Image: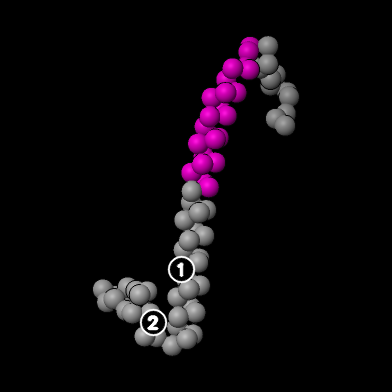
Amino acid sequence: MWRYTHDDKVYDVEKTSAEGQATFMLLAEVQSRLEKMETEVTINQAASVALHQKMQEFLSDDAIAEDDETEE
């Protein structure tokens, strides 16, 4: 049984119209995609932190840019 909660009421989606059920399935798919995207963002943020930490190994005073150099 699929359930949908709105305004503190729980609805049995199977008792809605075919269009209501299709809409619910689309909503479920979208929410699943959002959860996957949130997971991907978390993983990418962790990778960014790790790569920033790794980058520190390659920095030296010899690599400091002069004031007139532009950042690439």
Q: Quadrant of the N terminus?
A: bottom left
- Which residue: 38% across, 79% down? 13
Q: Residue 14 bears which disc, if any?
A: 2
Q: Residue at 60% across / 23% down in the picture?
A: 55
Tell me the kind of residue under disc 2: Glu
Mark nearer the N terminus (1 vs 2): 2
CA gap between label 1 and label 2 equals: 14 Å
Please report contact status of discs 1 and 2: CB closer than 8 Å, yes or no.
no
| Vertical relation: 30 (above or below) 41 | below
**Chief SS of the magenta region:** helix
Location of residue 18 in the rendering, given as x and y in whole percent from the top left corner: 47, 86
Residue type highlighted by circle 1: Ala
49 drawn magenta: yes
Quarter of the figure with residue 58 = top right
Side (left or right) of 67 relative to 40: right
**Residue 54: quarter of image:** top right
In the depicted structure, whether residue 70 falls above or below residue 36: above
Q: Position of residue 61 (x, y in %)?
A: 63, 11
The residue indicated by pointer 1 is 28
Q: Which residues are magenta?
A: 40-61
Q: Residues within 10 Å of mark 2 (few under 14, many from 20)?
A: few
Q: Residue furthest front?
A: 1
Taking the magenta stretch, the answer to whether it contains residue 57 is yes
Left or right of 40 in this view: 71: right
In x, y percent, where is residue 48? 55, 35
Element on which disc 1 rests = helix
